[in-house]
Image: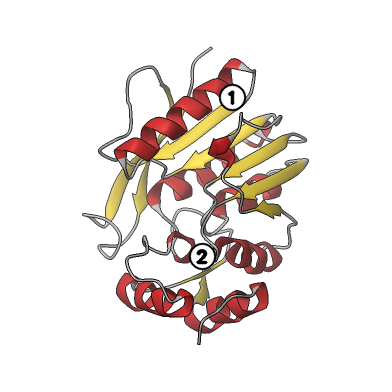
Amino acid sequence: MIIQTFEGRRAFILENTRIQPPPHTPELNLHLADEVTPIWRLTEEALAEIGLPPPFWAFAWAGGQALARYVLDHSDEVAGKRVLDFASGSGIVGIAAMRAGAGHTLATDIDPFCGAALAVNAELNDVRIDFTDQNLLDAPPPDVDVILAGDICYEKPLADQVMNWLAAAHVRGTRVLIGDPGRSYFPRVGLEKLAEYEVPTTRELEDREVKKTAVWTLPA
């Protein structure tokens, strides 16, 4: 059956994941998958598309876990502010922002499952987050106080585009926080490291079970 509705995607997520706390943010709970290949195959079948990227919404990736941890521990970064959770995936970062006292959070992701994943995970953590599936890279950065972006440098063309977009936001006065575990296309030049963590992950997702992961910002 091809899933085309929000309610269909929501039901798919509830059926094919289980509630569990991400290792680095045990105070949060998310609907997550345990293995990549089965959920990836099921997602392709549900959308009737072959060759889709991994279902980022089904896992708590290292960069997102580190960024969520940083936000939870440094609530002054987001408290009372307008926050954008860019490439939200499961919604872990946006949920952390709301738990840390953000005034409003908008999550954005072009994956059709992410809106449903965010909805079930936000409900699970008793927070409210708005969502858009529009590709925000096609326009100037929105007028927000903080942009949170985790795990955005998997592919070079996209990484370059996103970093340029974030730089434009920074020039306009937006605080930019980025979580990354040292992806190949992550630019380490011209950034300020705010924190570094040893993030437990899984060999299902990464090349090791613990990833050294940092949170970065664009310097003043």
Viewer-side residue, 30 vs 146: 146
Of labels 2 and 1, the one closer to you: 1
Residue at the top extreme of this rendering: 220
Tell me the element at label 2.
loop
Q: Position of residue 122 (x, y in %)?
A: 67, 62
SS class, disc 1 = helix
The residue that appears at 65% across and 45% down in the rendered structure is: 97
Foreground of the two, 7 or 148 = 7
Label 1 sits on what residue type?
A: Ala
Q: Which residue is mark 2?
A: 21
Residue on which the image places disc 1: 169
Residue name at image x 33 percent, y 19 percent: 189
Q: Quadrant of residue 39?
A: bottom left
Total labels: the figure holds 2
Looking at the figure, which quarter contains the C terminus? top right
Quarter of the view holding residue 170: top right
